[in-house]
Amino acid sequence: MKSILQKLSLAILAGTFAFSANAQTTDTVTVNPSYTNQTFYSFANGTVSSVSNLNWDLAFQLRGYAASILINSKNNVRLYNANKSAADWSTMTVADTTGILSNPINELFNSDTSWNFGAFNRTNNPADMFDLGWGNYDFMTHAITGDSVYFIKLSSGVYKKLCIVSLANSIYDFKWADLDGSNETLGAINKTTYAGKNFVYFSLLNNQTIDREPAYNSWDLSFAQYLTTTPIVYKVSGALTNDSVFAVKAYPVDVNTVSPTSYTFNNAINNIGYDWKAFNMTTNMYDIADSTVYFVQDRQGTIWKMIFTGFGGAANGNFYFYKGTTTGIGQIENSSIKTFDAAPNPAHGSTRLILSSEKAGDATMQVISMNGMLMSSDVIQLNNGLQSVDLSLETLAPGIYQVLITMGNERQITRIVVQ
């Protein structure tokens, strides 16, 4: 009986996955000459917005539990661990930079695999779940208290010292000053003012908060120039996936016949990245990798097939590609079941699904791995209206899973990450 359920679950996940030349369309996304912009893109709707990527220094995470803080490496902002505690702030002098700025071990970079690890988070202790790098989380007060001082080089070439003071009651408090302690300035950002975004941005040069990002659920990819640290630290231009958008690279394959059913999707944001192209020194143009397909599953469960066809480089900042849908796993049209979120997500031990139903009755809740294996199946009672359903994750290994809720011929799917 279990093998039948597993086959059924795989069929639900896989669908038909038809993709033909007639189904694909060409698209172009631009980040402007010299890669000056960041462009947010939706497979279903095209370019959502394209904004300057040169007017901010820091980005503060608004959603989730990681309290990630990014630096603008595109605009040559650089961050260094000062190896000083927050208590040392008032007694620090210019001499404290000696041996710090010249030692590569002290420089901190954003992760290019996860939005949850900005440069300020890279000094965290992985064994301590409450250590967020720039500060420590208090389980009782739910506040994060900053414990570190940093040196930051702005795009103007000026160095400052900086401390993230706290994140409490949804407000980030931070301060910065000249290296000798003069011109100390306080900053504050209220997360609730920017609900529905992944990050809010700040310019230290102009002491200005910048709301430059579209709603998190409106885009799938961010096209921009960013910094990678593998195998060496250098700027690259490519596409990073949004939070809760999953992708996988298929290579080498027949691009006309390859199916996503043979691949395991994951949520690393650089699954697409930059290395589908290489600069040809002979032609002074970019060669595009052949036999390469990217499958991307958007927030609605639709799986898209993406094939890059060209790259304009710094001359125009254009990305050229084919795209098309396969038969994905999303919600049946007009389904009366709506899943809003899972919290926490990522989670360990248990999570809670927040959903609504337009009718009451018994439903089946299945947890399915990304390769189609049925991990659990339970009957739950749905009520008419908004409700929550607790889901145990105790028996699941770390990874990405689909939660499929079925009532009659209606279904809804959400994705969870088990840590």
Image (spheres, rainbow, N blue to C red):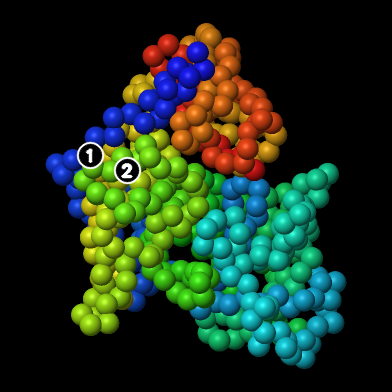
**Does residue 226 lie above or below 29 as drawn?**
below
* Residues at circles 2 and 1 in contact by the CB criterion of under 8 Å: no
| Badge 2 element | strand
Say which of 287 and 183 sits in front. Answer: 287
Q: Which mark is residue 304?
A: 2
Identified by mark 2, the residue type is Trp
Residue 142 makes an appearance in the image: yes
Q: Nearer the viewer, residue 29 or 303?
A: 303
- Which-is-in-front pick, marks 2 and 1? 1
From where the camera sits, is residue 54 visible? Answer: no
Q: In the picture shown, does residue 357 fall above or below 158?
A: above
CA separation in Å, label 2 and label 1 = 9 Å
Q: Please tell me whether residue 323 is drawn above or below residue 156 in the rendered image.
A: above
Give the residue at x 33% y 29%: 15
Mark 2 crowdedness (10 Å alpha carbons): few <14, some 14-19, many ≥20: many
Residue pointed to by mark 1 = 19
What percent of the width, then of the height, locates residue 319?
28, 63
Mark before the other along the chain sequence, 2 or 1: 1
**Up/down of 364 relative to 283, above or below:** above
Tag 1: residue type? Phe
Q: Assign a secondary structure to mark 1.
A: loop
Residue in the image at 63% along x and 33% along y: 396
Q: Residue 163: name its quadrant.
A: bottom right
Q: Residue at x 59, y 86 (%)?
A: 158
